[in-house]
Image (cartoon, grey):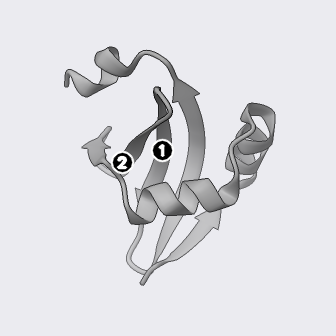
């Protein structure tokens, strides 16, 4: 199982947005789905209590690097893709 690493930007956004590291890890390990954003980045997401939690991360050979995370009520916008 790959190690999950949080960059400082991700830690700052988690604190600002009230999202726990434990929830981020849970979503990465067991997402409802994963959207490729660009060549090296992915977005894992999970619908929780009517909100979509999205985790932006890079997957490297031996680790997963969390870049950012946010929640949105615009579920249809993101799940339509």
Q: Residues within 10 Å of mark 1 (few under 14, many from 20)?
A: many
Residue 36 image position (x, y, % from top left): 27, 43
The secondary element bearing badge 1 is classed as strand
Going 50% across and 37% down the picture, which residue do you hit?
53
Q: Which mark is residue 14?
A: none
Q: Are marks 2 and 1 in contact (CB under 8 Å)?
A: yes
Q: Is residue 25 left or right of residue 76?
A: right
Residue depicted at 42% across the width and 66% down the height: 29
Residue 54 screen position, x and y as percent: 47, 38
Q: Which residue is mark 2?
A: 42
Mark 2 to mark 1 CA distance (whole Å): 6 Å
66 sits to left or right of 62: right
Q: How many marks?
A: 2
Q: What residue did someone put label 1 on?
A: 56
Q: Quadrant of residue 58?
A: bottom left
Q: Is residue 29 left or right of residue 18?
A: left
Q: Residue at x 59, y 42 (%)?
A: 68
How far across and how far down the image is residue 19, in percent? 68, 43
């Amino acid at each position: 199982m790959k190690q999950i690493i949080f960059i400082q930007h991700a830690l700052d956004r988690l604190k600002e947005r009230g999202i726990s590291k434990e929830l981020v890890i849970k979503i990465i390990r067991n997402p409802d789905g994963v959207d490729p954003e660009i060549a090296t980045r992915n977005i894992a997401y999970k619908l929780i209590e009517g909100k979509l939690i999205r985790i932006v991360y890079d997957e490297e050979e031996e680790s997963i690097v969390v870049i950012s995370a946010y929640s949105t009520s615009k579920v249809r916008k993101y799940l339509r893709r």
